[in-house]
Image (cartoon, grey):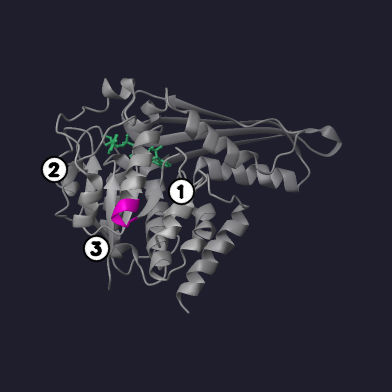
Amino acid sequence: MKKINVAIVGVGSFTKALVEGVAFYTKNPNEHRGLMNPFIGPYQVQDINFVAAFDVDERKVGKKLHEAISVKPNITKQITESLTYDAVVHRGPTLDSVSKAMKESFVQESTTPATDVATVLRESKADLVVNLVPSGGEQATLAYAQAALDAGCGFINCIPTPLATLSDWTQRFEAKGLVLLGDDIKSQLGATMLNRILLEFLKIRGIRVLKSEQENRGGNADHFNLLDRAASKEKSKREALTQFLTEDDVKPKVNFIYTGVPSGHKRVTIDIEGEMFGRVPITIHSVIEDEISVNGAGVLVDAIRVAKFLMDSNRQSDAWKASPFLMKSPTRPVSDGKAFDLFQEIIKVSHD
Ligand SMILES: NC(=O)c1ccc[n+]([C@@H]2O[C@H](COP(=O)([O-])OP(=O)(O)OC[C@H]3O[C@@H](n4cnc5c(N)ncnc54)[C@H](O)[C@@H]3O)[C@@H](O)[C@H]2O)c1
């Protein structure tokens, strides 16, 4: 079976969960529990292979990928011991991806000069680049995307910083026979999704929304980063929530709270108040407790496989059909039910 060669940008907690998740399904090839789609086209999770990685932190640069995922400040519940890889973490260009606060706390910037990303991608025979730099790294995201284009790799933008939703990037990838998926990867079962389903349901049932507040509490590096770089994340989440609301409803609120206690565990509360029949009040209180990086990795394994499968079968222009199921800010937003149908349609074609 052909493998999917993946280059990772940003060897943080999310990457740790992804690499260990691939190890879990490789060690247990008949285990399909926990997967949204065991097969995407011909690909299973164990067909994902890591061939290159980039980071800027001196504790990670120069290490093998399977060693770098477990150094501080990465923190997430271990799924299983990683497989071993020859892929070494290269020093990527920092540009704007590390805020001043992050430099003083979570990221210890390496003094090694930045490598030429496109050259590493070509030499490692990467099919796809997965962007997992901290939220807010706009120049860094554009630079890695350009390197992917130059090297002939598809690109998956997992972070809220816009790329696929910028006007011409999707076409630029398509024109080279490549796929761009983005922006801002969904969780397998996340707060935005539950908040959105509840709001959509309220609208279908004729209920006016008077309050919708989502509070995200966590203690990993990304939560810290969001203290001063939450703008694109909040925008991405808010836009995902407002699709079904009318002018008569309030605008949903989204807050991030950094607990200061190192943990990959996240606790989200969603409080909704509305008015039902006869303008009588109704309230909904929901809580999600999850391991944030694992929750995202469960979706990224689908994004990687569908991107490669669309490129294999020359269906780059169908990337928009995959995005709404996978991304919080897709190029063409649709309802969650429609997003599922579009994704399944792509998978069905794969078996023809
Ligand atoms: N469920 C989820 O965890 C989830 C969901 C949606 C989006 N995201 C996004 O995924 C991204 C990664 O999340 P995380 O928890 O792994 O964050 P993290 O802070 O643990 O990891 C980010 C890594 O990127 C590295 N980095 C910084 N600048 C870089 C550069 N220019 N080039 C290469 N590497 C660089 C850092 O050193 C760090 O190792 C964030 O932007 C987050 O918003 C995560």
Q: Position of residue 159 (x, y in %)?
A: 42, 41
**Pointer 3: what residue?**
27
Q: Nearer the viewer, mark 3 or mark 1?
A: 1
**Pointer 1: what residue?**
169
**Residue 63 falls in image quadrant:** top left
Question: Which circle marks residue 123 in the picture?
Answer: none
Residue drawn at 65 percent across, 33 percent down? 272
Please tell me whether residue 101 belongs to the stretch shown in magenta: no
Label 2 environment density (alpha carbons within 10 Å; few <14, some 14–19, many ≥20): some
Q: What amino acid type is highlighted by mark number 2?
A: Lys
Q: Nearer the viewer, mark 2 or mark 1?
A: 1
Is residue 332 rendered to the left or right of residue 290? right
Q: Earlier in the sequence, mark 2 or mark 3?
A: 3
**Pointer 2: what residue?**
63
Q: Main secondary structure of the magenta part?
A: helix
- Of the pair 292 and 68, the residue shown nearer to us: 68
- Of the pair 22 and 80, the residue shown nearer to us: 22
Q: CA distance from mark 2 to mark 3?
A: 23 Å
Which residues, given as a range, are shown in magenta? 149-153
